[in-house]
Image (cartoon, rainbow, N blue to C red):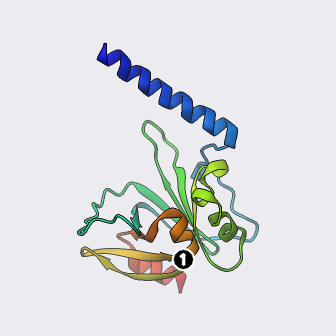
Amino acid sequence: MAFLLFVGALAAIVLFAVIVNRLTGTRAIYLETLQFESGERELWRDERSDFAAVPHLGQAASMSYARMRRHTVVWSDRRIIVSQKPLFSSRHMITHQIHFTDGTAGAQAAGEAFGGFYGRGFTTIAATAKSFGQVNHKDCVRIKPTQESGAKLNLGEALIFTDHLAELQKSLA
């Protein structure tokens, strides 16, 4: 009986998610089918990187970040796109998009509730600065969100771990 209740609860959660996605128009967007904006060009790509969102409130006193190399990060001249393969899929679903504040539409999308997740299918973060360095002796890019974007998403900073940090710095120079 307990197993049937568990299965029923899981079915209810899935049904609720489907209804919310239909009402809000949210759908998965995949990296393989993503069209760059006109004039936008890819500067760097790493298919074996990791992305971590560090919360502003409720952060653990000590954090460690495992390098599972599960994310694909595409850095263009206008934005950073973070994607990950869902279970049993061959395509990369976009999970985050990061825009540096320069008045673009991405910065506007970051101002919406939940970073514009509902309606687009991925979270948009407006950022002010980036720095290169190490966290827990692992090479990474530290991205500082704007105060407004950080408050809406409870985001202190975003980290992109990569084995090719020198190559990224060179491509951005």
Nearer to me, 100 or 15: 15
Give the quarter of the image for residue 17. Answer: top right
Q: Is residue 72 left or right of residue 15?
A: left
Residue in the image at 64% along x and 73% along y: 78
Relative height, residue 148 to residue 26 (above, below): below
Relative height, residue 143 to residue 92 (above, below): below
Give the tally of numbered discs: 1
Residue 33, visible in the rendered structure? no
Relative image position of residue 142 (x, y in whole percent): 42, 76
Please, which residue is most extreme toward the bottom here?
173
Residue 62, visible in the rendered structure? yes
Q: Is residue 57 left or right of residue 97?
A: left
Nearer to me, 91 or 25: 25
Instruction: Say which element carries label 1.
Output: helix
Relative image position of residue 20 (x, y in whole percent): 62, 38
Relative image position of residue 26 (x, y in whole percent): 64, 44
Three-letter amino acid code of the residue under disc 1: Gln
Please, which residue is most extreme toward the right here?
38
Relative height, residue 9 to residue 78 (above, below): above
Q: Quadrant of the N terminus?
A: top left
Residue in the image at 31% along x and 18% along y: 3
Give the quarter of the image for residue 57. Answer: bottom left
Q: Residues within 10 Å of mark 1 (few under 14, many from 20)?
A: some
* Residue at image mark 1: 147
Residue in the image at 66% along x and 71% along y: 107
Q: Is residue 53 left or right of residue 81?
A: left
Nearer to me, 6 or 47: 6
Relative height, residue 48 to residue 162 (above, below): above
Residue in the image at 71% along x and 77% along y: 103
Please, which residue is most extreme toward the top here?
1
Relative image position of residue 18 (x, y in whole percent): 59, 33
